[in-house]
Amino acid sequence: MNHPAPRPEFTARYFVESSVASEKIAQVIAGEQSSGTFLSLPGETDELKERSRARVVSIEPLAPTLQPTLPSAYVDRHSHGGVFHRAEIEIAFPVANVGANLSSLLATIAGNLYELGEVTGLRLLDIDLSPDYAAQFAGPAFGIPGTRQLAGVQGRPLIGTIIKPSIGLTPAQTAELVDSLCAAGIDFIKDDELIADPPYAPFDERLRAVMPVLHRHADRLGRMPMYSINISGSVDEMLRRHDAVLAAGGTCVMASINWVGFAAVEYLRRHARLPIHGHRNGWGALTRHGGLGFSFQAYQKLWRLAGIDHLHVNGIRSKFWEPDESVIASARACLTPWAGLQPLMPVFSSGQWAGLAPDLYAALGSVDLMHLAGGGIIGHPDGTAAGTASMHEGWEAAVAGVSLNSYAESHPALRRALVHFANL
Amino acid sequence: MNHPAPRPEFTARYFVESSVASEKIAQVIAGEQSSGTFLSLPGETDELKERSRARVVSIEPLAPTLQPTLPSAYVDRHSHGGVFHRAEIEIAFPVANVGANLSSLLATIAGNLYELGEVTGLRLLDIDLSPDYAAQFAGPAFGIPGTRQLAGVQGRPLIGTIIKPSIGLTPAQTAELVDSLCAAGIDFIKDDELIADPPYAPFDERLRAVMPVLHRHADRLGRMPMYSINISGSVDEMLRRHDAVLAAGGTCVMASINWVGFAAVEYLRRHARLPIHGHRNGWGALTRHGGLGFSFQAYQKLWRLAGIDHLHVNGIRSKFWEPDESVIASARACLTPWAGLQPLMPVFSSGQWAGLAPDLYAALGSVDLMHLAGGGIIGHPDGTAAGTASMHEGWEAAVAGVSLNSYAESHPALRRALVHFANL
């Protein structure tokens, strides 16, 4: 390990598996992703290295394995014997290599290193930036307090749902559904990620159909249910759509962050006057193999830098692959202030219903979240209003520290939900 | 399988592994990614399904496995016995669900499906769009002929190299290096993906330092060596930088496509008057596990829709993990016209030198490529000019069908390269 140089740095922590010793592969990665290579290059002066070279901060060895986690033709060609070394390593990069440039930051911490021949496993586990450096990025503009203020909901989770069917409803049908959901007392409604601007339900027409409904309910409620309308598309269309939502009095915009991409989301954030609901569809491709890709911990920090306000974390006991502990860890990561940037509001969805509130509250100790239920609201045997009420009642019981069963004695919507959903 | 409906569709082909039968998981994916779910929803009329539901086109069974490829807490909770079914499936989606919207296209073909609980392996293998539909996207503006024209190189590969050290050179040092590379006869020079706009070598200063050098050599050569300068950054900076390159007489811009993202790259393409050099750093995270993520075949089509002109494919016998057959297949994919969109120019790099030309030519039957060598040029024992000459001579021998050894008899640069590099 080198001594820390007196230069501003940021760090990245990785799981790494390699056919070469962990000390060596850490140096290879640090070199590949900064100035140094094992080849001595003309022009690579000591001064340049001092300025630009990444340094290995730490290496924590893990138990080695005899089988490579990921294939490598390079390893097959240069057989180094049968042991694959594993470690968690931390590397410090000079801030001056990157500047306030998200795509350069990603190219540095998550670029060619995934393809290195000696590497048979590589996962970005975490990153850390100083508050000074992080302040140069956009960061969330609204976060939890800004979202609560716009939604008019304090002291409890935002209870929400998703427009279903995912795709295929006309603007009029969408507005009708939004009307019934608002009548049922919902706080938050989001478009499915599949719908953005299809020819039979163009964005502008959808917005035009839905906004009067929201305004009517806002007049009644004294607060406007938050409708997270999917503006994902080209850069100019997203900005134009954001402006249309703002002009119509809407309070949120949604984007498929992985596919819109970092530069466009950050650009939207610099322009936006509304919270950005970050939908992470496609995230499974980046995280689902434990020896490759990204941890959610790193991922949420990167998107926090880009400036989204809400981020999906799946649900506990959902239809998705993810273990509950992982879902909870993701939500906690979102809720933790970091590098001077405010928390993201975690969004729980898939397989959610009233009965899960106590477990969520026990795990998080917080009501700063969106709890989205589809079937858990519209599938309630007494209808959507009872479904929404049951979600509120579940959280009331959780926060009061009362068991669901005893709270249900005086709350029929919760009672029916417990009977109906507990055995599904 | 349903009968094809009389509606425009596009298709996606997947490898899928699941705890449930392939026929069922194919329907689940089709439903999850379009209108249908197994739950019957209010509003999900027959008309809506007809308009919006994806359909399963084909299922080709593969040998099952007893161990899941990817973990799933859902499978652990709902144990379905010990067999995991595998298949290649093809799904057809209505064009009307998506329109000409890259992020919606990705959300549809590569969204939540990676996280489905019953799915223990999922990889997007290929996509297909009709020429009518593909024409609504940007597509490459320059491709191979446009690049050749700007570089003034016909009938042979563009021989190129990468500015090294990757990061740390001042603008003056960069210009000096570019000068020596141009003097050595190089066709193409690219920035490393790590450098974009660091404080000690700001983009504008780098451009200002390099352009006079390129113009001086252009005057001498009658063609300007193509310098692919890394403009990756925020949306407005990328556009501004593109304009600065264009105004200074430059002929190419480069972007880290995965981290800039689809919307910003497509936006750049709609604005650009120069070819876009697509650097794929980070690609390993998306592809390196065979049971997850994306195949290059699908990836290059998606970026072709976005409108890049060049795309990296690694090198044969490189320092990276990828088998040579995979590198060649990637280059072939780039070179194949598709859906009315012109081919991408494949970019070979890492571990490249003159001696690899015959194998590349034999595998591709084409000289429409960029062949980038670092050490293979600057590490030539007789210097950079000899290194560049050796690359040309390697390709001359390959195209003429003459063995390297016999061509080397009358070509000293190649002869020295063969002695020096063959045993490295």
Image (tube, coloured by chain):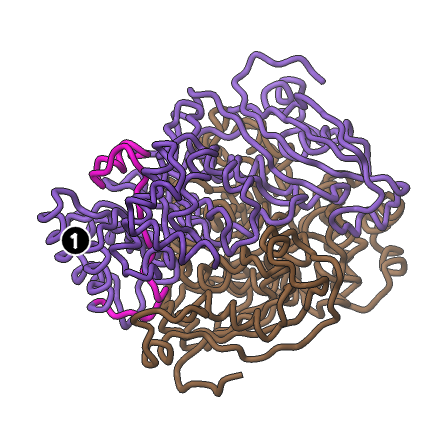
Chain colours: A brown, B purple
The stretch drawn in magenta includes residue B166: yes
Tell me if residue A236 can be seen. Answer: no
The stretch drawn in magenta includes residue B326: no
Left or right position of A231 against B64: left
Question: What residue is shown at x 35% (from left), y 34% (from top)?
Answer: B368
Residue A192 screen position, x and y as percent: 59, 39
Task: Work out whether B130 lies above or below A190.
Answer: above
Left or right position of B175 against A51: left
Q: Say which of A369 and A341 sits in front.
A: A341
Left or right position of A202 against B238: right
Question: What residue is shown at x 38% (from left), y 67% (from top)?
Answer: A98
Left or right position of B29 against B267: right
Task: Work out whether A43 lies above or below A198.
Answer: below
| Magenta-colored span | B142-171
Residue B289 screen position, x and y as percent: 64, 48
Amino acid type at circle 1 is Leu
Residue A42 screen position, x and y as percent: 31, 70
Residue under pointer 1: B214
